[in-house]
Amino acid sequence: MPRAEWEMLLDRLRHAARTGQGLNGVSPGTAARLLGHDALTLCLATPRGHLELLWSDDAADRLGPAMDDLQYVLGEGPTLEALHTGRTVVEPDLRNTPIGRWPQFLPAAAHTHVRTVVAVPLLLGVVSVGVLTAYRVRPGAPSAQQIAATDRFARAALNLLLYTSPARLLTGEHGAGLTLHRAEVHQATGVLAVQLRVALDQALLRLRAHAYSQDRALLDVARDVIAHRLRLDNGSS
């Protein structure tokens, strides 16, 4: 990345910190472009070990959220590997990645436009607290400079989150903070837990399994459950 563009990106992060906007003050689409990618997502780990999408590209095709949802439903993929290993994962071409690495994710990803992925763990010491993932629709290994810049941006973004108060992190002033991408999934999980009389983890697994088996977006299934258009009785997938 040219030094001028990197300084521009850092200036936007500093401005967001000074004005109290947090990460929401930085456009994911702009950051992705300056870093040489097509989409960015930033997820934080929950106490239960799931990843919650907090910040993502604003492109019309919603490339980043779609890839994040795919990994969330299937329970595997580069973002989750980066979280669990604490190491940056670089995949130059998903269509040439050995199938045994992510046996469910790779066939599903082949139906998307994404070819290249860089997943950078957000580390506090040796603990992974989240992941910044970059996606590109063209194959080819990112340069060492691009990977280094993406890593530096990930660390700067984490610092910005750490200095954002919990109250403003999700709500912000006048409701302008970061939003939980899967808030409706959590709501539907609660509905299912009551309906099926099972633990929340089991209800979430049932929700994910149904979305996968029906080849539907997880959020669409969640909305149907909340609106009582869909009821997943015991024994149904």
Image (cartoon, rainbow, N blue to C red):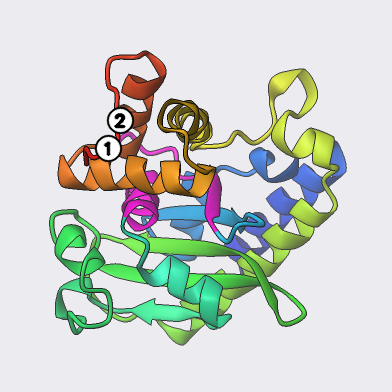
Q: CA distance from mark 2 to mark 1?
A: 7 Å
Asked whether 227 or 220 is in front, the reply is 227
Is the residue under label 1 in contact with that under label 2 (CB below 8 Å)?
Answer: yes
Density class for disc 1 (Cα within 10 Å; few <14, some 14-19, many ≥20) is some
Q: Quadrant of residue 157?
A: bottom right
Residue that appears at 43% across and 26% down: 195
Mark number displayed over residue 217: 1
Per the rendered image, the range of residues in magenta is 50-73
| Residue occupying image coordinates x 68% and y 45% | 23
Point out the image quarter for the C terminus: top left
Closer to viewer: mark 2 or mark 1:
2
Q: Mark 2, residues whose alpha carbon is within 10 Å: few (<14), some, or many (≥20)? A: many
User: Would residue 108 appear left or right of 64 to someone viewing this image?
Assistant: left
Q: Is residue 172 magenta?
A: no
Give left or right: position of 197 versus 227: right
Query: Foreground: 101 or 115?
Result: 101
Look at 53% across and 76% down and name the residue there. Answer: 84
- Disc on res. 180: none
Where 107 falls versus 72 (above or below)?
below
Residue linked to disc 2: 221
